[in-house]
Image (cartoon, helix red, strand yellow):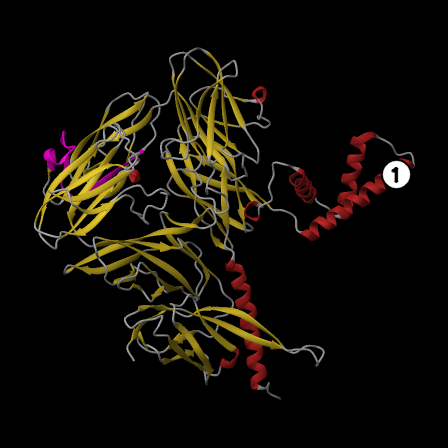
Amino acid sequence: MSRMPRSLGWSLILLLVVATSNTWAQRFRNPPRISYVWPAGGRRGTTFEVTIGGQYLAKTTEIRVSGEGIETELLDHIRPPTAKEIANIREFFQRARKQIAEEAKGGKRGGRLAAYRRFLEIARKEGVTDRQIETFNRYRRDRNNPKKQVNPQLTESLKVRVTLAADARPGPRELRVTTALGLSNVLRFRVGELPECREKEPNDKMTQATPVPSMPMVLNGQIMPGDVDRFRFKARRGQQLVVDVRARDLIPYLADAVPGWFQATVALYDASGAEVAFVDDYRFNPDPVILYDVPRDGDYVLEIRDAIYRGREDFVYRIALGELPFVSSIFPLGARRGEKVTVSVEGVNLPTSTVTRDMTDAETGVQSIRVSGKTHDSNALPFAVDDVPERLEEEPNSDAARAGKVKLPVMVNGRIDRPGDWDVYRFYARKGERIVAEVHARRLGSPLDSLLRLTDTRGKVVALNDDHVDKGAGLVTHHADSQLSVAAPKTGDYLLWLGDTQHKGGRAYGYRLRIGRAKGDFALRIVPSSVNTPGGTTVPVTVHALRTGGFDGDITLRLKDAPTGFKLSGGWVPTGQDQCTMTLTVPAKPAEKLTPLTLEGFATIRGREVRRRAVPADDVVQAFILHHLVPVEDWTAVVASRRWGGPGWTVVGKPPLRLKADDTTRVRVTTRWRRAPTKRYQLELKDPPKGITIKSVTPGRGDLAVLLHVDAGKAKPGLKGNLIFNVFAEIKRKPKDAKGPVKTRRWPMGALPAVSFEVVAR
């Protein structure tokens, strides 16, 4: 019995690995992506259908909505026809029309209905299904619809039946789709308490306005290109009408639109057609709100459109309409954990002017305040909970002579209660002490655009700040809150001035001002929020470190209660860096369910260990270029089956690798296949630091010798981080014509576990 040549055997194995690896690489290269859900919510205690639009939605297995009290059932998956399907069905239409026309010439006449029935008979005879005909007709309607824009991200859709339990918690939820490709991104879905109404097209003209059966009511719709939606309702004299629009709130960021969201405008018309109100935003919020005192009984028309008449299926809105409780501001904007606090609330249609909250068992962070009305609750405003001692500002405190004296650390709750007002605070600091002062206002729903100025008692400016970017506030686009961090130049008293940069003010202009000595800390964000990969593979993840209080040291990262088979490699954020990419290796055995993961970070700050949980987030693009870390509830992994394990590459040696500046360092990469054809594999660095490159890769017996070069002009000694190697298999194919060039194809084989490094002096 003849034996297969070793080289041929390894070639066949390599081809098998490449084929299966490429199949899975293709499979997980495009996980499901959802772009909108319409309607984007519903009333609890009801069952209704929604449409979820997106891409790569084939073989959807589950529609997941966070929280309890929601059931979903997939009804249908609708996708556009392929070019081949379009050509085939178009040819069938032509043949069927020709056959029916010839039969009509032969005396078989029966009108349009008979012709249609004959068309269906021909279709069944040729095996053309009703679904194929419907898909083709939809394609033709969309192509000829001037209000329909072709966008690959919106080409597929799911029809889903949603059932909301009567006791389902009202408020926003997170909706995802699970398919054979993995887990999708997150969209917002709201559980409401009010009756719901959907727009009925056409409703562009006043005479076509969709009638609103009663109030209060939630109106649902979509704005298409050039579209205007109108709703007609009856109102009574003396009503305090609230029109509360949710548009950007539902889909915070659109990657391919400027300014990066649906910029809704709303107008109100009376029975004569006169415009009585128009709003394009609410304070700093792009979603508009109308508060209108109805002067007389009669019909009114509400109009909504995009500010510049854009539109698409993902321009989705929900409008709460009626004599609703609406909170416009609260004070204070937060409280200390473990205490009771009485919060004053202002707005319209409110049954009370105060709300009492018990913070005894509260967790630090941001919660919400709402007012319970007679039949339903008001909108919610953010409410902060902290551990710092609190106090209220004491007026007058608008100049140096009347500055309020505070003892550090302190959290001051105050207001810039009139245009041009300044609030001034006096505190004592020793020379060299680092003092941090930070305003929380815009992040808590206040319209204040703060300005902080630190001076000595003679008025000399020590530090000044207008806006401070908080990367942890992923839904904020105008970072209007201020922060100062400064070392006191001498021992003595200092004055901290707080005002509004636009010289505005009022009862809504509340703030929380934290003043204290620098106390290093950090927060973490892990991207992406869902890991979709075949079993046994290694995938990169990125951790962002949000450092505060001058902390600049190493942060060690570990999986908490790591499920069996999951391993984090390169788990750290080095000193002086705000982010680091590492890798997560998943078990070879697939999991039938989603696997929840938890990542924790550890650091030593002033001699004590500080531990923080990494908040999962998605790196979302706004208006083509701007990136935001939008937090979500859970970090999860989808581990699918894999037909072939691959060669299993690893880097030899105990990390960190010590790379010599202005020199080369040899790194050995081995595989579990001792006789693997290593000369057919290539390595590349994924997003390497500037100055670190692969000089050469030399194949050996079951290993690869990698020479890494460090350019000392770009990578200085002391530089730390992670190196991630991507593996590619190269297959050379000879042409059928011996005279042609040899073609080389490269197939991605995945990544090696991240290995930490440090650049050292030569």
What is the total number of numbered labels drawn onto the structure image? 1
Q: Is residue 20 visible?
A: yes
Nearest to the observer: residue 134 or residue 738: 738
Residue 517 is situated, as x and y percent measured from the top left of the image, at 14, 50
Image: 401 above or below 715: above
Q: Is residue 363 visible?
A: no
Quadrant where the N terminus lies? bottom right
Residue range (magenta): 381-404
Residue 556 is situated, as x and y percent measured from the top left of the image, at 26, 63
- Residue 19: in magenta span: no
Secondary structure of the residue carrying tag 1 is helix
Residue 110 in which image quadrant: top right
Image: 602 above or below 335: below
Residue with the mark numbered 1:
103
Quadrant where the C terminus lies? bottom left
Q: Residues within 10 Å of mark 1 (few under 14, many from 20)?
A: few
Residue at 59% in and 82% down: 8
Q: Is residue 104 left or right of residue 569?
A: right
Residue 241 is situated, as x and y percent measured from the top left of the image, at 39, 20
Q: Residue furthest right?
A: 106
The residue type indicated by label 1 comes to Glu
